[in-house]
Amino acid sequence: MAAAPRIAVVGLGQWGRNLVRNAHALGALAMVYDDAPAVREAFAVSHPDVRVARAVEDIWSDSCIEGVMIATPAATHGALAAAGIDAGKHVFVEKPLCLDIGEAVRLKAQSEKAGRVLMVGHLLLYHPAFRALSKAASSGALGTLRYIYANRASLGRIRREENALWSFAPHDISMILTLAGRMPFSVACSGGQFLAVGVADTTLSHLDFGTALQAHIFVSWLHPYKDQRLVVIGSDAMVVFDDVEQGAQKLRLYRHKAQWDGNIPIVTRADVEPVPYEGAEPLRLECEAFLAAMRGERQPPSDGEEGIRVLRVLDACQRALYTGERVKLLP
């Protein structure tokens, strides 16, 4: 087996440490960097086998580093990704790709011109349970998709630099766009600001794909319990992906049917069926996908183009949130 590409992780916060753990286990971790000197010093003690850069420029100038994984605040993503590509590195950026659609388009063009991978951390596209759900949907096992809703709520992870929409919704937008196979025609979004002026703590977004398919996403960091569910309603079956549950309860299929017999609604209920899926850590699969893309083996599902699509929907939802009006998306 060929040696894993050598990568660096920029940002050693909670999620950055998860990237470090997986990259290290895959034999790919070569260097790390964090803006905080105390964080760098603590990491050097706990990981004496990994080089700790004193400045991010040390990563850009190191020819042995082939790729970089960026896990810093969202506002810094665009500039760091651009610098990494300019330095000849393959780049993985935690979601969102950046905060501006124009900047995202430029990053994609920059990576293509440089012949470098640009990948976004839309983790749930790599979740084995979602992969099984997506396969069921694309195979026609659910029939025609009619409605999708996503709940992503918990108590905490409250932020000032971004609202709950930008913090929580990218994962669900990514999954919904994958299942739909197209962009929505328009979006509507409402929300509430309770802890800080100008920062929505909860939002409800509605994605209109036309008469055949509708979807909504509820997100909140002021919720009494963790709720991470994706519910997909098809003409032949319904599926619940509940990421809070474990084992067979995480992905469940219901062959319920609802139809009209003349003027009489007929509802047929069926027993729940657990849907089998691979028992692998989603983040490990995502890191493996980045390394495979760096080796030129396959294109990752969450590439730059997919990141732009998610960003376009996020941006439209944000505008709808501020204006209170439905926002149309251009073809």
Image (tube, rainbow, N blue to C red):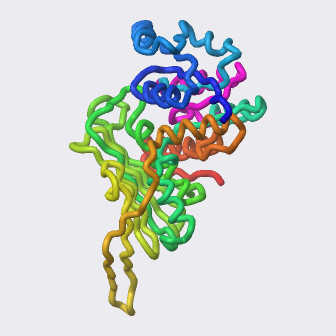
As rendered, which of 179 and 25 lies closer to the eye? 25
Residue 99 occupies quadrant: top right
Let me know if residue 323 appears in the view.
Answer: no
Residue 167 relative to residue 99: left or right: left
Q: Quadrant of the C terminus?
A: bottom right
Q: Quadrant of the N terminus?
A: top right
Q: How many marks?
A: 0
As rendered, which of 183 and 279 lies closer to the eye? 279
**Residue 131 percent location from the top left of the image:** 51, 54
Question: Is residue 85 a member of the stretch shown in magenta?
Answer: yes
Over which residues does the magenta segment extend? 73-102
Q: Residue at x 32, y 51 (%)?
A: 246
Q: Residue at x 39, y 83 (%)?
A: 259
The outermost residue toward the left is 224
Residue 108 occupies quadrant: top right
As rendered, which of 331 and 108 lies closer to the eye? 108
Residue 278 relative to residue 224: left or right: right
As rendered, which of 83 and 207 lies closer to the eye? 83
**Residue 11 percent location from the top left of the image:** 48, 20
Vertical position of residue 130 compared to residue 286: above or below: below
Q: Residue at x 51, y 35 (%)?
A: 95
Q: Residue at x 26, y 38 (%)?
A: 155
**Residue 84 percent location from the top left of the image:** 65, 22
Question: Is residue 48 a member of the stretch shown in magenta?
Answer: no
The outermost residue toward the bottom is 262
The outermost residue toward the front is 1
Residue 163 occupies quadrant: top left
**Residue 132 percent location from the top left of the image:** 49, 58
Vertical position of residue 77 compared to residue 252: above or below: above
Let me know if residue 200 appears in the view.
Answer: yes
